[in-house]
Amino acid sequence: MRKAIVHAFKLASIFKTEVAFAQISKNASNNKLPISLIDELNTENIAYKEISLGNLAIEPNNTIQQLEAIFIVTEFAKGKLSAIKQNEVFTYLYKAKIPSILLGEKSEEKCNYQNITVPVDFKRETKEKMIWASYFGRFNQAVIHLFVANHKTESAQRKIKATLIFTKRMYEQFNFDYKIVKSERSSNWLKQDAYSFSEQFHSDLIVLLSQKNNGLLNKYFGPAEIKKHLRNNKNPILFINPLKDYYLPCN
């Protein structure tokens, strides 16, 4: 949990908020939080509290709404991202009405969240990624790298152009730096190139949407592609579910 604690406090520092810690485990003996470690890693004396997540029928959104939470931060330790084992954390993440920041086995403890990669394809939901990436530009003066798919078809080009115009207007309104980098691949292969791009440019965060049709297997085991990235790459993921009517930070 060490990396998750450090990242949670870093995000709280950026967004001028507090941290709520909760354990998700069926084993009651694993539900004790390491308070001494939390205090040791809380170098900026950020306010925090312990919480319990109750009935899955109303959680985590009941708690999210009460706390006016912005992100869920989750660290997957070694062995927790197996392709064949159930991962109960994803059950909560798919239900949550806020995005989740996912840390993998190779994610680094130190992260400034000032170098953000956003793959841009022709899907309408891509605008959601632009909105959430903008918060890091607005509150943390992050540089947003828009990694844009390459299409020959006119309809796909038109959709991508509309997304970039929307993004340009929004980002320039808040006056932070962004860069447009063109991929040589189409939307169907963009994620694979985006992973490599984010590693190459030492990105602090890559912003991804879950699939539109998540399916029972993804909700039960977790999305295979994202789990593979978290096993093998350093970049944390900002995981957005396009099927959810998200709560948005208001200021």
Image (cartoon, rainbow, N blue to C red):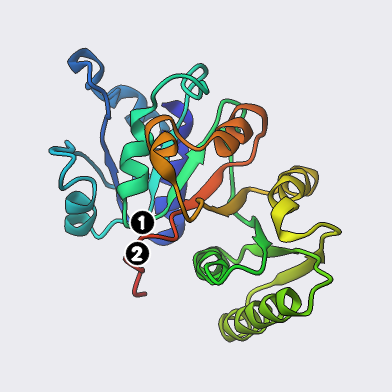
In this rendered view, identify the residue nearer to me: 74 or 156: 156
Amino acid at pointer 2? Tyr
Which structural element holds mark 2? loop
Identify the residue position indicated by label 2 in the image. Answer: 246
- Please tell me which residue lies in front, 38 or 30: 30
Give the side of residue 65 with respect to residue 238, left or right: left
The quadrant in which the C terminus is found is bottom left
Say which element carries label 1: loop
Q: Which one is in front, 73 or 38?
A: 73
Q: Position of residue 198 (x, y in %)?
A: 72, 48
User: Where residue 156 is drawn, which disc sits there?
Assistant: none
Residue at 13% across, 38% down:
55
Residue type at mark 1?
Ile
Q: Nearer the viewer, residue 121 or 4?
A: 121
Q: Crowding near pointer 1: few (<14 within 10 Å), some, many (20+)?
A: many
- Please indicate whether residue 76 sits to the left or right of residue 46 in the image: right
Q: Residue at x 55, y 45 (%)?
A: 237
Residue 53: image location, x then y, percent = 18, 38
Q: Is residue 30 above or below residue 158?
A: above
Rendered view: 52 above or below 35: below
Mark 2, Cα crowd under 10 Å, few <14 / some 14-19 / many 20+, is: some
According to the picture, the residue beneath numbered tag 1 turns out to be 98
